[in-house]
Image (spheres, helix red, strand yellow):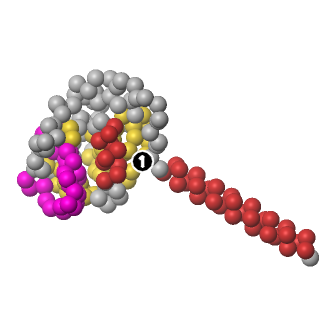
Amino acid sequence: MARSSSGIVAGLTAAAIAAVGFLGYQASASAPPRVPQTAPQDPAPAASLPAKQDPSKPAAVPEGSGTGVRVVYSVSQKRVWLVGDPAQPVRSFPVVPSTVHPAVGTYAVGSRSGAVTGSDGVPIEHVVRFATVEGVVLGFSARVDGATPDPDPSKKTGGIRMARADGDAMWAFATISSKVVVVP
């Protein structure tokens, strides 16, 4: 009898270890990638991004973008604002729009991915998806190599690209169901 009890305990212990291992794998598969501890390499020139905003004079959140916690994306200004609660400063940064643009309106973040290959074939990270237009999924992301070139105008792409640091901020801010407001 003692042998059979220890066999059951051993079996339950093995099953518990396997379950914990599986759950750990699932958690790591959906977590954002770790930032390497080595010195970053110089990315390709960021010629496509507008000049950096003076931090002492942040770009004003566009009128008509609603209220409350939200991501505001202006297609014409090629800029995003992360608007948190009133006690938090608004973060704003330039982006490189995709070739397919969302209509003006309010959306919700529907899915996110820590790291994938973009519709343009390059590795991207911190993907925050919020709309689909003409079968093209639209979302914010950063290229892993840090480059921000204009997209190929002959291809339908949905990646609204930003610098990696801004992609980190977007990832932390825009979780599932977060409001995204698109303005002209």
Residue 159 visible, this orientation: no
Q: Position of residue 164 (x, y in %)?
A: 34, 37
Q: How many numbered discs sit on the rendered protein?
A: 1
In front here: 26 or 53? Answer: 53
Residue 78 falls in image quadrant: top left
Q: Quadrant of residue 22?
A: bottom right
Does the rendering let one see residue 178? yes
Q: Residue at x 10, y 48 (%)?
A: 60
Where residue 58 appears, as percent x and y from the top left, is 13, 44
- The answer to which of 183 and 103 lies nearer the viewer is 183
Q: Which residues are magenta?
A: 63-92
- Mark 1 lies on residue: 113
Secondary structure of the residue carrying numbered label 1: strand
Rendered residue at 40%/40% (across/down): 125
Q: Which amino acid type is marked by label 1? A: Ser
Spot occupied by residue 105 in the image (x, y as percentages of width and height): 17, 54
Q: Position of residue 158 (x, y in %)?
A: 30, 40
Task: Indicate whether 149 appears above or below 102.
Answer: above
Residue 60 part of the magenta-drawn span = no
Q: Quadrant of the N terminus?
A: bottom right
Magenta-colored stretch includes residue 87: yes
Graded by Cα atoms within 10 Å as few (under 14), some (14 to 19) or many (20 or more), the crowding at tag 1 reads: some
Q: Residue furthest front?
A: 56
Determine which quarter of the picture holds residue 136: top left
Which residue is at 68% across, 58% downward? 18
